[in-house]
Image (cartoon, grey):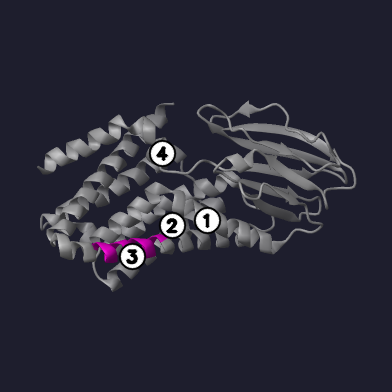
Amino acid sequence: MKRALFHLLCAGLLLTGSGISAVVHGHALQPGYLEMRQIDETLFAVTWKKPAVEGVPMAIAVTLPQQCDPREEGPLVWDGSAYYARWTTTCTGGLPGGTLTINGLEHTSTDVLVRIGFADGATGTHRLTPTDPSFILPSQPDRLEVVRTYSSFGVEHILLGIDHLLFIFALLLLVKGARRIVATVTAFTVAHSITLAGVTLGWVQMPGPPVEATIALSIAFVAAEILHSRQARPGMTERYPWVVAFTFGLLHGFGFAGALAEVGLPVGEIPLALLFFNLGVEIGQLLFIAGVYAGFFLLRHVARLAGASAITWGTGAAAYTIGCLAMFWVVQRTLLFFT
């Protein structure tokens, strides 16, 4: 029966893989990125990254402030992950007071990070969203905007990063006891914070595809540990959950660093942006854990009506589903090594 369920779940995932592309990739759609770097009093170098949707540029376009010429994006070039346009523009009187707009952003589910680098080394950062696709450029960079932008980006990344959430969910299914859960989550947090800082500051580097494949493998490992536990064969994760959480947390930190690298960090505010991105990740993680335990509370009440075996069966089904999806990612991401 268990093997039949396993094969059924895996087959379902494989057959419907093309219809759940957002899920099988494990990450949300990449954000857009716009950088304006001041060269002299009126001249700015513009870099515009536009996400790809099914092999074509997303239907969004940047419009620079009225005093800039040219205001529209230049020719787009594909770099293997997104479309880039680079050009220079002359902004009479500078940028302060001008309105920058991302046209079409309101019809998407992504966001755009805008970074302005001034000649004196100051940097301003702003995050544009579908509900707020334009803003008026300030005269001076606002550190509070860096805090708001990078903390919200951290929350969004963890809550839309399905692979990271599945790893945490699998740990919560396996680890019992409040103290052990706190120790496990803390170990995961400390580990990915170390890696995130190390990669961002240039101390360590690792290619993206192997990291993503190993992250998927870590999820499959914990899913297998859940099944071993149900067979009265506790594995390392159940006996030493903080050790496993710390070890795999180092790998997941590379994934967080990859997301941060896609939008970049403001020059002069790297420690501040890094700190609040990490805090945003932790806030999102805690929100997810709170939601999971709220769901567990409701299931316990339902189980009283359906019988205690409903929870046991549900845990097993969840483990098989998580394991199948994780192995799908392992294969999918391993194939990227050869592309």
Q: The residue under label 4 is which amino acid type?
A: His
Up the image or down, 37 lies above or below 246; here it is above
First in sequence, mark 3 or 2: give its number. 2
Identify the secondary structure beneath mark 3.
helix
Q: Residue at x 14, y 56 (%)?
A: 230
- Asked whether residue 293 is drawn in magenta, I would say yes
Identify the secondary structure beneath mark 2.
helix
What is the x, y in percent for residue 265? 62, 51
CB under 8 Å between discs 3 and 1: no
Q: The residue under label 1 is which amino acid type?
A: Gly
At label 4, counting other C-alpha atoms closer than 10 Å, the crowd grade (few under 14, some 14-19, many 20 or more) is some
First in sequence, mark 4 or 3: give its number. 4
Q: The residue under label 2 is which amino acid type?
A: His
Identify the secondary structure beneath mark 4.
loop
Up the image or down, 248 lies above or below 308; here it is above
CB under 8 Å between discs 4 and 3: no
Who is closer to the viewer here, 58 or 333? 58
| Residue at the spot of label 3 | 294
Separation of disc 3 and disc 2 at Cα?
Answer: 25 Å
| Residue at the spot of label 1 | 154
Which corner quadrant holds the N terminus? top left
Q: Quarter of the image holding residue 239?
A: bottom left
Q: The residue under label 3 is which amino acid type?
A: Ala
